[in-house]
């Protein structure tokens, strides 16, 4: 017997994929996190759809982080309360974190394990 999904599932998945926030998605779908979890436990297809929606939201975050790190964003410069110019700001910390995650051998934190007194194990 196939499980019939509640009518809120499509809305939940759409909002979750867009924002990546389970509480926001549950509110938009007019359901609760508890009902979502119960359905995830009962239906592997829905559970997989939730994971895919979360992955889509994470991809969007990574895309924005990459854009800010590589292309920057415009930040207003104000003088005496008035906007006078814009400057392009880049995020070196985002770039560093992304490199550490994607290329840990080259850019990750280096840790060396040694024995007593710094000698070999």
Image (spheres, rainbow, N blue to C red):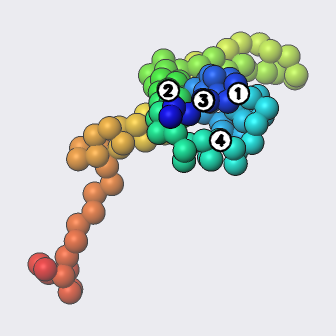
Q: Tell me, for residue 36, which label it has, or none.
A: 4
The secondary structure type at the circle numbered 2 is helix
Q: Which residue is mark 1?
A: 8
Real-space Cα distance between discs 2 and 4?
18 Å
Q: Residue at image x 52%, y 39%?
A: 43
Real-space Cα distance between discs 3 and 1?
12 Å
Q: Nearer the viewer, mark 1 or mark 2?
A: 1
The secondary structure type at the circle numbered 4 is helix
Percent coordinates x, y for residue 109 in the rendering: 33, 54
Percent coordinates x, y for residue 54 in the rendering: 53, 34
Q: How many marks?
A: 4
The secondary structure type at the circle numbered 3 is loop
Image side of residue 118 versus residue 33, left or right: left
Q: Nearer the viewer, mark 2 or mark 3?
A: 3
Q: Tell me, for residue 56, which label it has, or none.
A: 2
Q: Nearer the viewer, mark 3 or mark 1?
A: 3
Real-space Cα distance between discs 2 and 3?
25 Å
The secondary structure type at the circle numbered 1 is loop
* Sequence-first disc among 2 and 3: 3
- Residue situated furthest bottom in the rendering: 116
Q: Residues within 10 Å of mark 4 (few under 14, many from 20)?
A: many
Real-space Cα distance between discs 4 and 3?
14 Å
Q: Are marks 2 and 4 in contact (CB under 8 Å)?
A: no
Q: Residues within 10 Å of mark 1 (few under 14, many from 20)?
A: some
- Residue situated furthest right in the rendering: 81
Q: Tell me, for residue 4, which label it has, or none.
A: 3
* Sequence-first disc among 4 and 3: 3
Q: Residue at image x 20%, y 86%?
A: 116
Real-space Cα distance between discs 1 and 2?
19 Å
């Amino acid at each position: 017997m196939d499980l019939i999904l509640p009518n809120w599932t499509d809305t939940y998945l759409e909002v979750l994929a867009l924002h990546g926030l389970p509480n926001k998605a549950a509110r938009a779908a007019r359901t609760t996190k508890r009902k979502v979890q119960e359905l995830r436990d009962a239906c592997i297809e829905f559970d997989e759809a939730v994971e895919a929606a979360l992955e889509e939201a994470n991809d969007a975050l990574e895309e924005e982080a990459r854009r800010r790190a590589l292309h920057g964003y415009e930040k207003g410069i104000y003088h005496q309360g008035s906007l006078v110019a814009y400057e392009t700001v880049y995020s070196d910390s985002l770039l560093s974190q992304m490199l550490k995650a994607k290329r840990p051998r080259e850019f990750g934190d280096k840790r060396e394990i040694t024995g007593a007194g710094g000698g070999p194990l």
